[in-house]
């Protein structure tokens, strides 16, 4: 039988989402809209037509809003409502405080995106006027229209993974900044040093040798050269052992020693710049150690959640890559469909059609940027190690009709990784390359054909 009602899968998913929100915002509940700030909290109690039943400003911190919620319940009960639903914008940390206070009183709690409030503010009177009183009413109105969402449930283990993921991202950014500074300084005062290795910042030998040159001799290249190659090699070996390495690359070491005689560079700034390079090399090393410790903690949390085997069953997805993605998503089971997770990352395609016109399809670019970045970083390893992703990439970039650019194809792979990760975790089954290639229907039809 066909779909006689004409209701699409998207319609069913939307209807289910509205049903979940309606359970949180029932018509017998009044809506408490809260505009949060540091020491000033604006609270309004509204009905479902956004008529203001009560309004009050509380001069207190977010932790003291329990009295405001109790006051709102009394005002709602006086107007015949059975309870209240609390709504606010998820800005800063205060919304989490309000959510905990509401949970302690068994009050439903939802959030309204600040972008929704901004659009509603403009449509209210076609101005950009902004006041706390108006925003509180708009939050309540959007909640009554079910233009809200249920925030991620609080869990200690998942919360720890999220904080570790945030620290990992901070350390990656810090290390990247230090690498860029070292590169810029060397390009100015000693460019030959960057040509001694194909990828100098991935070479332990290069980093150890640069530490010897910049730290031991204060950046005086002639003094280091007078050491001779043999003594220079012994110093670099000691530095590599100190960094946890075993043996240096003699090719890189000798090339760097030969570069000591290269006169290219702004010599007037060489001593000062190489002193900065020495300090940056030390900071870079410490950042790498802290990053390794953070990643080890994330892997331990993934083991604690008993998700390591499931996540890494996807060929090419490392435990750290999976943990970085899950640190941004939280528990994937809270997303009803894999497409909802892809939308959350901003990797879903955005259609542009009207009548007979069909425009260019682009990504939404909305959602969580950190999740989009975490998924994008996993593409490089997965594309090489996973034959399904490699074949998909080759097909997308070589087909005759609608051929994609390499970047577009990699974006498709990133979205596929998110869908597959959602599938293996929600179903509790390991990744199957046959299902990933052909889908579940193909697998079910195979025994019948045999």
Image (tube, rainbow, N blue to C red):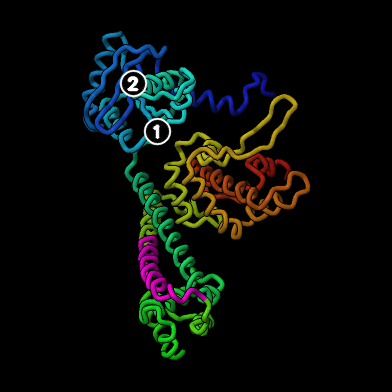
In the figure, 141 relative to 290: above or below? above
Mark number displayed over residue 201:
none
Name the one closer to the observer, 46 or 329: 46
226 to the left or right of 195:
left
Numbered disc in front, either 1 or 2: 2
Q: CA distance from mark 1 to mark 2?
A: 23 Å
In the rendered structure, are the residues bearing label 1 and label 2 in contact, judged by CB atoms less than 8 Å apart?
Answer: no
In the figure, 349 relative to 233: above or below? above
28 to the left or right of 356:
left
Determine the residue positioned at 39% across, 67% down: 280
Instruction: State the quadrant of the C terminus.
Output: top right
Percent position (x, y) of residue 376? 54, 51
- Is residue 189 visible in the rendered image? The answer is yes
Mark number displayed over residue 133:
2
Percent position (x, y) of residue 110? 38, 27
Percent position (x, y) of residue 126? 49, 20
């Amino acid at each position: 039988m066909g779909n006689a009602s004409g209701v699409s899968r998207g319609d069913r998913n939307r209807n289910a989402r509205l049903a979940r929100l309606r359970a949180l915002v029932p018509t017998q509940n009044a809506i408490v809209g809260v505009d949060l700030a540091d020491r000033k909290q604006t609270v309004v109690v509204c009905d479902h037509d956004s008529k203001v039943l009560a309004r009050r400003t509380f001069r207190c911190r977010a932790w003291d809003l329990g009295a405001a919620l109790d006051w709102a319940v009394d005002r709602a009960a006086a107007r015949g409502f059975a309870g209240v639903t609390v709504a606010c914008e998820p800005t800063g940390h205060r919304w989490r405080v309000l959510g905990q206070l509401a949970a302690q009183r068994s009050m439903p709690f939802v959030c309204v995106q600040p972008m929704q409030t901004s659009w509603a503010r403009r449509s209210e009177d076609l101005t950009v006027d902004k006041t706390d009183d108006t925003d509180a009413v708009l939050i309540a109105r959007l909640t009554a229209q079910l233009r809200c969402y249920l925030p991620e449930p609080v869990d200690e283990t998942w919360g720890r993974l999220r904080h570790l993921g945030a620290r990992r991202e901070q350390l990656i950014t810090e290390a990247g900044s230090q690498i860029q500074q070292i590169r810029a300084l060397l390009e100015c005062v000693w460019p030959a040093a960057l040509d001694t290795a194909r990828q100098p910042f991935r070479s332990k030998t290069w980093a150890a040798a640069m530490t010897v040159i910049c730290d031991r001799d204060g950046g005086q290249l002639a003094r280091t050269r007078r050491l001779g190659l043999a003594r220079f090699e012994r110093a670099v070996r000691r530095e590599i052992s100190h960094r946890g390495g075993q043996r240096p690359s003699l090719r890189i070491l000798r090339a760097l020693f030969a570069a000591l005689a290269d006169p290219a560079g702004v010599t007037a700034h060489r001593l000062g710049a190489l002193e900065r390079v020495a300090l940056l090399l030390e900071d870079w090393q410490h950042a790498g150690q802290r990053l390794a410790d953070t990643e080890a903690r994330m892997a331990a949390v993934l083991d604690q959640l008993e998700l390591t085997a499931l996540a890494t069953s996807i060929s090419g997805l490392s435990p750290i890559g999976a943990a970085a993605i899950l640190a941004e998503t939280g528990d994937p089971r809270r997303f009803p469909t894999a497409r909802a997770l892809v939308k959350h990352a901003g990797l879903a395609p955005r259609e542009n059609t009207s009548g007979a016109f069909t425009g260019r399809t682009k990504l939404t670019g909305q959602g969580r940027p950190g999740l989009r970045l975490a998924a994008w970083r996993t593409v490089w390893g997965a594309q090489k190690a996973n034959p399904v992703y490699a074949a998909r990439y080759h097909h997308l970039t070589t087909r005759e009709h609608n051929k994609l650019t390499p970047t577009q194809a990699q974006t498709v792979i990133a979205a596929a990784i998110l869908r597959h990760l959602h599938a293996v975790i929600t179903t509790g089954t390991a990744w199957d390359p046959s299902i990933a290639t052909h889908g579940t229907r193909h697998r079910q039809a195979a025994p019948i054909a045999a």
